[in-house]
Amino acid sequence: MLHQTIHREIVWFYPWLRKMASGLMASERRSHTLQPTALANEVLAKLMSWKGEISGDTELSLRVLATTVAKQTLIDRGRRRTNKDLYMERMRHENSNQWLHQDTPPPGSRVPIVLDVIEQLESVDQDLASLVRMRFFEGCTFQQATERLGMSPRTAARRWAFAKTFLAKAIEREESR
């Protein structure tokens, strides 16, 4: 069986497996937290528990099987990581939406304070409040925001400097209460 074959051939197989894992990891685009040795160990553990048989040239078949298992392991880890990243992004989005609609902000959150200050700013200058909303909440670059508002870059820069100072002082006042 494969288990006996691996034990007999481990002298040449494990160094080859580590080298193959290093090559696979080097050719990957994304950075992995998985090290080549860990990948080799995981592949070896999967091969040791495999119940199948190898026919023909044992060494060649073993190499092909190990390479296939290593590639599938990297694919599975990538999928899990992508799913985790998507889940975390969705949770961040859901949590930020919840905080916007709560009466009491979470500890250390400035979002409700910023929203109150923007409302105060809107009573003074609607364009300035829109500039702040675009920058803070819509993720617009400075250039995108000025183009959308139809402001010259120089005027927008002056107003942006005023808005930042206004926001900083208002946030400081609110947090000191």
Image (cartoon, rainbow, N blue to C red):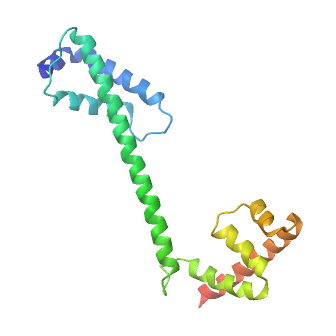
- On screen, 63 above or below 45? above
Question: Where's residue 53, x and y in %?
Answer: 14, 19
Seen at 71% across and 73% down, the residue is: 132
Image quadrant where residue 63 sits: top left
Picture quarter with the C terminus: bottom right
Q: Residue furthest top?
A: 57
Seen at 79% across and 69% down, the residue is: 149
Image quadrant where residue 70 sits: top left
| The one of 55 and 15 positioned closer to us in this rendering | 55
Question: Where's residue 80, x and y in %?
Answer: 36, 47
Q: Residue furthest bottom?
A: 177
| The one of 35 and 143 positioned closer to us in this rendering | 143
Seen at 65% across and 63% down, the residue is: 139
Query: In screen coordinates, is 91 left or right of 50?
Result: right
- On screen, 102 above or below 73? below
Question: Where's residue 147, x and y in %?
Answer: 80, 63
- On screen, 61 above or below 28? above
Picture quarter with the N terminus: top left
Question: Where's residue 102, x and y in %?
Answer: 48, 83
Image quadrant where residue 55 sits: top left
Seen at 49% across and 66% down, the residue is: 93
Query: In screen coordinates, is 115 left or right of 68?
Result: right
